[in-house]
Image (spheres, rainbow, N blue to C red):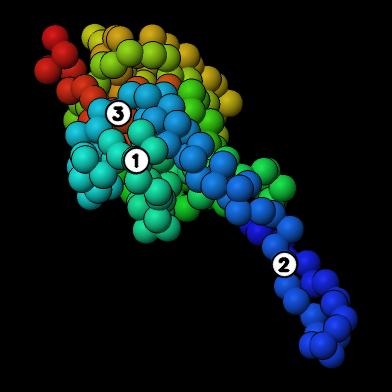
Amino acid sequence: MTHWHAENTTGQSGGQSTGHPVESDDAVDRTLDGVGARLRALRARRGLTLAELSEQTGISVSTLSRLESGGRRPTLDLLMRLAAVYRASLDDLVGAPQIADPRVHPKPFYRGGRAIIPLTRSNPDVHAFKMVLPGHPLDAPVEQRAHEGYDWIYVLSGRVRLALGDEELVLEPGEAAEFDTRVPHGHASASATEPAEVLNLLSTQGERVHLRGTGAGSAADAS
């Protein structure tokens, strides 16, 4: 954010005040010039291609490429679309100093009947979520997916069915599990009528697969 400083001047103008920005145009230019590299690095950490990012943001591949190479200056509209996909703040995208409130203000969203609350804002490697799993028919299988990385789950309330390939176990409140996600896996409430609440730590690949529906198929596709 640019802060403005009022400086009093005297002379023929009668001592009127003139506003001058403390931050110079050169500093602003340096900040904007660094955005491209930050966007390119962030996309790489998320494991997204330009085509995948284009599909999720509605921004053309050529525009994204020019943004990342520095051939085009970012506009507020473009940054807002990218921030929404990356679940990052505008300050994170432009590299502004972290002087704001560090608390995360989560915005819940829904996938497959689950309420999902993001608990991390800009960590590129680990994504933390609170999930509310709805009741799941006891005779219905738990959908499984496989991908690179590791997942971690902690049960806050209710009981959770954790399926790992051909094995299935039930986690009680206060229990945690960590597993290699190259093994097909999935979890659901262990009750047909009662929800369960969990904390879930996902790798970048896991976040893409489970919450965005990209990057890997179901267990059947992975076999």
Q: Which mark is residue 71?
A: 1
Q: Quadrant of residue 80?
A: bottom left
Report how far apart the C-alphas of labels 1 and 2 lie in the structure. 29 Å
| Proximity of marks 3 and 1: CB atoms separated by less than 8 Å | no
The residue positioned 37% from the left and 24% from the top of the image is 44
The residue positioned 42% from the left and 36% from the top of the image is 36
- Who comes first in sequence, dot 2 or dot 3? 2
> What amino acid is at disc 2?
His
Q: Residue 21, position in %: x, y?
A: 70, 62
131 displayed left or right of 78: right
Crowd rating for badge 1 (residues with CA inside 10 Å; few <14, some 14–19, many 20+): few
Which quadrant does the C terminus fall into?
A: top left
Q: Is residue 194 above or below residue 210?
A: below
Report how far apart the C-alphas of labels 3 and 1 lie in the structure. 20 Å
> What amino acid is at disc 1?
Gly
> What amino acid is at disc 3?
Leu
Crowd rating for badge 2 (residues with CA inside 10 Å; few <14, some 14–19, many 20+): few
Dot 3 falls on a residue whose secondary structure is loop
113 displayed left or right of 201: left
The residue where tag 2 is placed is: 20
Q: Which mark is residue 48?
A: 3
Q: Nearer the viewer, mark 2 or mark 3?
A: 2
